[in-house]
Image (spheres, grey):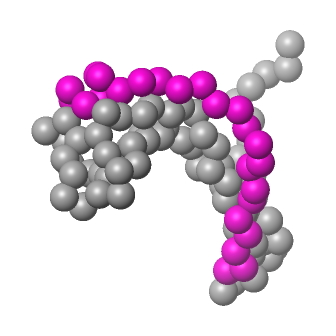
């Protein structure tokens, strides 16, 4: 049995196997922007890769959805004093 999901609801391998894979269409993918105490700006975006509707329901009667996602992270406005010299590339031009 796997752990996770809403409190009080166990999600098993069988639940995952019986779940329905759903197609989806991107509507909006916003960047969340955070200013760090060292002055840098961190930008984070969650990108959805897959969705599965399980045959389990939360206490309100709504079906549970399992998502597969990737976090994209960019750091900008980094002060020069915090940067390090880039390493020399191992790739040779063709």
> In the rendered view, would you say 87 is above or below 74?
above
Tell me the residue at 86%/13% (across/down): 94
Q: Is residue 82 visible?
A: no
Measuring from the top left, give residue 52's x and y in whole percent.
44, 32
Horizontal and vertical percent position of residue 92 = 79, 22
The residue at 43%/41% (across/down) is 65
Q: Nearer the viewer, residue 12 or 59?
A: 59
Q: Nearer the viewer, residue 50 or 94?
A: 50
Q: Is residue 58 left or right of residue 76?
A: left
Q: Is residue 1 above or below residue 61?
A: above
Residue at 19% x, 35% y: name it: 12
Residue 40 seen in this snapshot: yes
Tag count: 0
- Left or right? Give the position of 36 relative to 52: right
Name the one closer to the observer, 63 or 94.
63
Q: Nearer the viewer, residue 85 or 3?
A: 3
Q: Write the start and end of the magenta stretch as one range.
A: 13-36
Q: Residue furthest bottom?
A: 37
Residue at horizontal 53%, vertical 31%?
50
Residue 54 on image: x %, y %: 35, 34
Residue that protrudes farthest toward the left in the picture: 1
- Most extreme residue toward the right is 94
| Residue 70: x %, y % from top left | 57, 43
Q: Is residue 18 magenta?
A: yes
* Quarter of the N terminus within the rendering: top left
Q: Quadrant of residue 2?
A: top left
Q: Is residue 35 magenta?
A: yes
Quadrant of res 32: bottom right
């Amino acid at each position: 049995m796997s752990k996770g999901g809403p409190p009080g609801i166990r999600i098993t391998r069988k639940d995952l196997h019986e779940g329905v894979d759903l197609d989806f269409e991107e509507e909006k993918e916003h960047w969340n922007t955070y200013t760090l105490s060292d002055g840098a700006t961190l930008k984070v975006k969650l990108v959805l890769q897959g969705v599965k509707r399980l045959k389990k329901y939360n206490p309100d009667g709504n079906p549970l959805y399992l998502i597969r996602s990737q976090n994209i992270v960019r750091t900008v406005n980094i002060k020069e004093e915090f940067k390090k010299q880039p390493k020399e590339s191992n790739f040779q031009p063709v």
